Every structure is written in structure tokens, then in C-alpha cells.
Amino acid sequence: MQPFLTHKGIAAPLDRSNVDTDMIIPKQFLKKTERTGFGKHVFHELRFTDYEGTKENPDFVLNQPVYRKATVLLARDNFGCGSSREHAPWALSDYGFKVIIAPSFADIFYNNSLKNGILLVRLDSKSVDELFQEILKSPGSQISADLPAQKVISPSGKEYTFEIHAFAKDCLLKGLDHIGWTLQFSDKIDSYEQSLAASRPWLA
């Protein structure tokens, strides 16, 4: 996982509430445990008009030329609801999204995304409305995210402050998932296990 400090990218407006994880990555594509290769299937049922995924829906935002290289996703309430599948953030990350901004996220999806290096930004509905208005007025414009300062900056330069748990922020800044964070203390863990084995050999 790469450290996340700042990011600036094209913002795609997904003007839809209650986008669930099956909509993000349909169940028929959950056939492997590697984290890569899911990006081509993200939002499959919205992006394509056929089951095979060969006919694009021209009305879907990510199929519009100006948004094809979007790395910031602007969404509505309750993004990532539904099942707890970790494939959803895998698919979004593999597609290229680095930041998702919405008024609210499903809790499990929120935590899974942070663990996979995606910055999720909660802003109040009024602020999200303002960002939507700017993006729709100027398609292809960019939004910036500054994790150390906990701010997102609109295309016009307006700043919005967001909250994030200190532990999640630290992990993102260092590019660590929970396993990586634990491995920081491998020397102390080894030392403890050795002292435990010496003092209580019957546990071995």
C-alpha cells in the first residue's frame, strides 16, 4: 500500500444515493482473492448494457470521455452499503480511484477502503451539493485532497475540512494496512515471545 499524503485528480460525479457493494462490483466477478483485476468490472451493471460488458452505456458518468481518467469520486448518501465484500474497495482502487467524497458511507465499506489505501471523505450534504454544482458546471475539473491538513479543495479553491480517526490517518500516511502496522513492532513481538518461552517453557 502506498502512503497517502495529497492527491489531485479529475472528479467524477456519481449522483446516486445508496450505492451498494453489489452495484460497485457484482457478485459474478468475485472469483479470486487477489486484489487486482477487478477495476474493469467496477459499476458493471451501470457501465454496460449487456452481461458480457462489451456494450457501454453512454449515459453513465465513467463512460463519458471527460471522466474516463477520474481518480476522485463524488457520491451521495450511504455509499458502499450492502454486503461487507472487500472486493468493492479493491475494484475501486484497481480502477484508479484514490479519493471518494460523500455525506455518509457504510461502516464496513469505510473501514475496508481505508485499509486498502483509499481516502474516504465525509462532508455534510450542503458541502457535497456545492462540489457537485462545481463539477457539473465544469466537467473534467479537479478536486484536491490534503490528508495531513484534513482538507479537500474544490476546483474554485474553496476548502472543506473533514474528520478522520487518528489511527486511520496514521496508517494512510505511512501506507500501512493493519498487518503492516503490526509488523512495525516485530522486534518487540519477537522479544516478548522469547522471554515468554524462557520463563514458561511448558507453554512451548
Image (cartoon, rainbow, N blue to C red):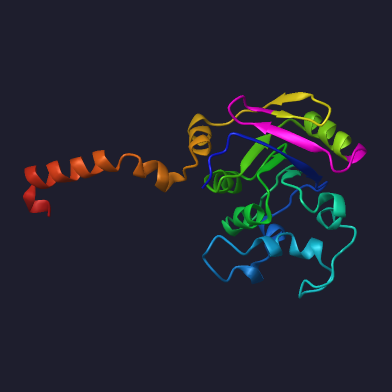
Which residue is at the far right?
A: 137
Residue range corresponding to the magenta coloring: 136-151
Q: Position of residue 39 (x, y in %)?
A: 67, 60
Is 150 one of the magenta-colored residues?
yes
Q: Is residue 42 left or right of residue 50?
A: left
Q: Position of residue 144 (x, y in %)?
A: 72, 33
Determine whether 6 is above or below 17 in the image: above
**Residue at the (63%, 45%) spot, across then down:** 106
Q: Is residue 204 visible?
A: yes
Q: Is residue 83 left or right of residue 129?
A: left
Q: Is residue 76 visible?
A: no
Q: Position of residue 140 (x, y in %)?
A: 85, 43
Is 30 one of the magenta-colored residues?
no
**Residue at the (52%, 46%) spot, across then down:** 115
Q: Is residue 54 left or right of residue 151?
A: right
Determine whether 121 is above or below 57 in the image: above
Q: Which corner quadrant holds the C terminus?
A: bottom left
Determine whether 39 is above or below 155 in the image: below
The quarter of the picture where residue 24 lies is: bottom right
